[in-house]
Amino acid sequence: MKQEIYDELETSVYLEHLVETKNENEIEKLLKIKKHKIINNREIAEFYSDLIKEICDLKIKTPTAHLILSHLYLDYENNYEKSYYHLSRAIYYGSDEAKWFMGIYLLGNSKMQPFLKPHPKTGLEILKKLAKTTENTTVQSLSTSSAASYIVRNFNIKEISEEEKELVDSYSSDNSLIITDDYFFLALFYAGE
């Protein structure tokens, strides 16, 4: 435990130095490494939150800082407006992961629903585009499975475009991507029901 505390202190001192120099590339690299730990641990989130806010206030290209802050506002403060603002900034600065979250939120599957009205058509378009264009393999897998899952749950094979059918075929051919509940929906989808 002491080592973990020491490591976080050391990281925060280094991050503060990067903030002083406004080295956006190094800030972005470090935040990508720390992102999941910050987002998924309330104590660590509280430890870094002021520094993350400071980074976002610098108005430098740090999409991961905005994505982290979006999660902190949504998960720990239920501040939908600030969460949405920082998610939008992360998208503006080019985060495909933030685009994936926006697509999911627009499908209506989210904690953001009290603030952001579902718009499934737009959400699906975002996810389909990411599935085809992102270079981030994690986001590509998430986008493919999210879009295909939505399609098989809401349409049958006769109601979709060839592009959407190819997406579902890609999804259904890779068992590592398939969401367990979707096996039933895939069967109905391919049966045309």
Image: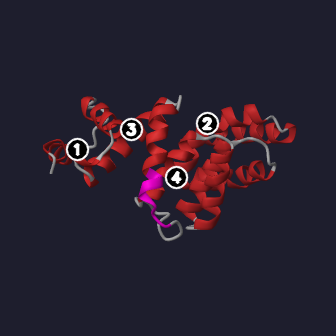
Q: Which residue is mark 4?
A: 102
Q: Which residue is mark 2?
A: 32
Measured as percent of width and height from the top left, residue 166 is found at 32, 33
Q: Indicate the secondary structure of the residue bearing disc 3.
A: helix
- Visible in this render: residue 99? yes
| Residue 3 locus on image (x, y percent) | 60, 36
Label 4 or label 1, whichever lies nearer to me, is: 1
Q: Is residue 120 inside the magenta stretch?
A: yes
Q: At x 27% / y 38%, what residue is drawn?
A: 178
Q: Mark 4 or 1 closer to N-term?
A: 4
Which amino acid lies under the numbered mark 1 shown in the image of this protein?
Ile
Q: Nearer the viewer, residue 163 or 57?
A: 163
Give the image location of residue 171, x and y in percent: 30, 35
Assign the N terminus to one quadrant of the image: top right
**Amino acid at the residue labelled 4:** Met
The magenta region covers 117-123
Judging by the rendered image, the residue that carries numbered circle 3 is: 144
**Which of pointers 1 and 3 lies earlier in the amino acid sequence?**
3
